[in-house]
Amino acid sequence: MEEFKYRGYTLEQLQKMSLKELIPIVNADVRRSLKRLNLNEKAKKLIEKIAKKDNVRTHLREMVILPQWVGKTIHVYNGKEFVPVKITPKMIFHRLGEYSFTTKRVKHGSPGLMATRSSSYVPIK
C-alpha cells in the first residue's frame, strides 16, 4: 500500500506540526479559515474536545479536518441527525460537512393505498 503524502509531507510529519506550521502548506481557502480560528471560540473548543476524546458530536460542518484527527470518529450534524464520520488520511484539509450528506437519494416506488388511476402508473424498467 502506498504511503500517504500531502505536498511532500508524510502523515507523521503533518501530525507533529502546529497550526502555525500547517498554514503555509495548505490551499488558500483552508489557509484563510485556519487563520480565522483565532476569532472562533466554538472551533477552538472542538479542537480541544477531539484532542481529549473520540466520538465527539458537532454542528460545525465548515470546520477543516486536521491531521491530528486521523483515526478518530466525529459525529457531524446533517440537519436531522448526527452522522458518524471516520477520519482517514485522504480527508485531511477537507471540510467535515463534505462527508455528512444533508439529502438522501430519492427512490420512487410503487403507488400507495388509495392512489388514483393516473398516479398508479409505474414505468417498467
Image (cartoon, helix red, strand yellow):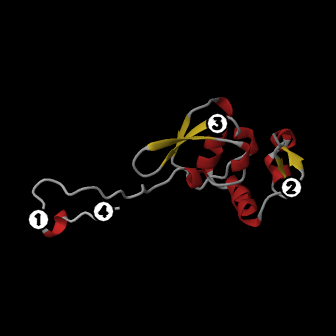
Count of numbered circles on the image: 4
Can you identify the residue that label 1 sits on?
A: 116
Q: Residues within 10 Å of mark 4 (few under 14, many from 20)?
A: few
**Left or right: where does residue 8 sit relative to residue 80?**
right
The amino acid type, in three-letter code, at marker 2 is: Arg
The x, y position of residue 110, in whole percent, is: 24, 56
Q: Earlier in the sequence, mark 4 or mark 3?
A: 3
Label 3, residues with CA under 10 Å away: few <14, some 14-19, many ≥20: some
* Image-based side of 17 in relation to 61, left or right: right
Amino acid found under the numbered disc labelled 3: Ile
Mark 2 and mark 4 lie on one chain; the one further toward the N terminus is 2
User: Mark 1 to mark 3: distance in Å?
Assistant: 53 Å
Three-letter code, disc 4:
Ile
Q: Quadrant of residue 17?
A: top right
Numbered disc 2: secondary structure: loop
* Residue ID for mark 4: 124
Which residue occupies the foreground of this view, 8 or 45? Answer: 8
Residue that badge 3 annotates: 50
Disc 4/disc 3 C-alpha distance (Å): 50 Å
Query: Can you tell which mark lies on residue 7?
Result: 2
Contact, mark 4 vs mark 1 (Cβ under 8 Å): no
Q: Earlier in the sequence, mark 4 or mark 1?
A: 1
Residue 91, label in figure: none
Which marked residue is nearer to the observer: mark 4 or mark 1? 4
Q: Position of residue 20 (x, y in %)?
A: 82, 51
The nearer-to-camera label among 4 and 3 is 4
